[in-house]
Amino acid sequence: MKSLYVRIYLTLVALLLAFAFGSAWLFQRHIEQERGNVELVAGERLNAMAGLLKLALPAATAAREDQADVFADWGGRLRMPIALVDAEGRRIAATVMFQRRVDDPGAIVVSAGLGDGRSLEMVRTVRPGPPQGGLAGPPGGGPGARPQRLDEGPWAGPWLHRPVSPNAPAVSTLAIVLVLLFVGVAAGAYPVVRRLTRRLEVLKRGVEQFGAGQLGHRVDDSGSDEVAALAGSFNQAADRIETLLRSHQSLLANASHELRSPLARLKMAFAMLEDAGPAQRERLAREIDVNIAELDALVEEVLLASRLEAGSALGDTHAVELLALGAEEAARSEVAFEPETDSARIDGQERLLRRALRNLLDNARRYGGPEVQLTLRPVAGGYEFVVADRGPGVPAEMRERIFEPFFRLPGHAEMAGGVGLGLSLVKQIAERHGGSVRCLPRDGGGSRFVLFLPASRR
């Protein structure tokens, strides 16, 4: 298969070649038409001069010297290559211009009768070669040739209106000009086409490198044309893919690490069951149930985080009443709920919003002590859930990091519960709904987690 730049280049050159030949053909037709018009006018002028000289010249029986003198006077006025010929074909007089041109290559002598036996001759320069349409050129070319009369032969009538073929030098010149034009345009078009396709080739190599595993590779997206836009789109897609892959790799590594603890505890509990007494068996059974529940929660949170990160559809979006949602989750978690609005409705996925609010409340109860408070308040552009606690608080430098997957504050051991995905899920769910979550200090000690959700547009 030919390269793209070769196909574009050949197409461009072929179009230019067709345009050049088409233009040349139209130009040639126009030139021939104009030449015919000019020669027709010249023939009419010759006939007019013949009529004028017939009236001005002495009679045919007058002395040759008298005829020559009068003709010379009129020849100087007319400034034409003409000659006066008697009835026997002998030239009585001729202008200097006639004498100079009559022996030129391609010169023909045409004549017009004066009605008294005499005739008026004029030199015309005709390009050699047969006229178009199969007509032979006028006889009498070259020195000493017999004059061609306007009323005889193939030149009878409006003879000068017949088109005459161009001579070989003119054809050669036109061909050379066309060839030079073609070569010049082709040479000028090549770097333009090559530059365009070279950028596409660079983009192709960049895609191949990215596909080969070089996730950090990006292509040059400078410029403002379609190729630059395509390169920019590729870079954006590559950034997204790299982020997803890095996130999945991190998620897998952290999940594997988090699975070790409950699995190790399960293994130890099952190993101790055989030699345990009734009381110890009951305790081990409860521990096994707790570890299995922890594994189940971990797998569920990992799957949800993965689907949120990938942007997968997780249900239909519909109107959600935040007031009812807050009251239900506050009652479940046994915390105080203080709404500051009578109605708060947004468009969203209720299951995800419930999960986000529940994670915030569980996190506050786990680390913030018994004094937990939930508030719902209207703000510009939407509503905010505020979960406040009286725990040890979060250091300022870690208020962003606590929303990273599997991140735990120093001193929070695994035995405190949770796997470090709860707040990360809250952030993903908030961003999926066009909102945000942030951690702020609380006056008097503790933390405030603020979940902002935009209001319904309906």
Image (spheres, helix red, strand yellow):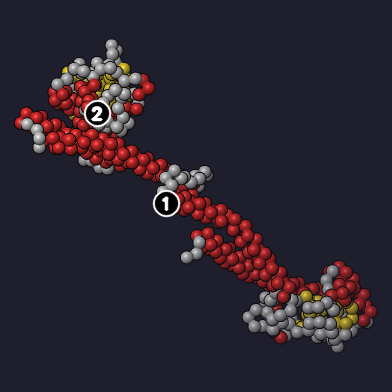
Q: Position of residue 224 (x, y in %)?
A: 51, 44
**Mark in front: 1 vs 2:** 2
* Image quadrant in which you'd find residue 273: top left
What residue lies at 56% left-to-right and 56% top-to-bottom?
194
* Number of marks drawn: 2
Q: List the residue tagged with mark 2.
A: 414
The residue furthest left is 278
Instruction: Give residue 212's mark.
Output: 1
**77 in relation to 458, above or below:** below
> What secondary structure is found at the residue carrying circle 2?
helix
> What secondary structure is found at the residue carrying circle 1?
loop
The residue furthest bottom is 88
Q: Is residue 46 visible?
A: yes
**437 in relation to 56, above or below:** above
* Image quadrant in which you'd find residue 387: top left
The residue furthest top is 444
Q: Amino acid at mark 2?
A: Glu
The residue furthest front is 275
Q: Position of residue 156 (x, y in %)?
A: 70, 82
Instruction: Give residue 93's mark.
Output: none
Q: Position of residue 280 (x, y in %)?
A: 9, 30
- Quarter placement of the C terminus: top left
Q: Earlier in the sequence, mark 1 or mark 2?
A: 1
Observer-nearest of 401 and 178: 401
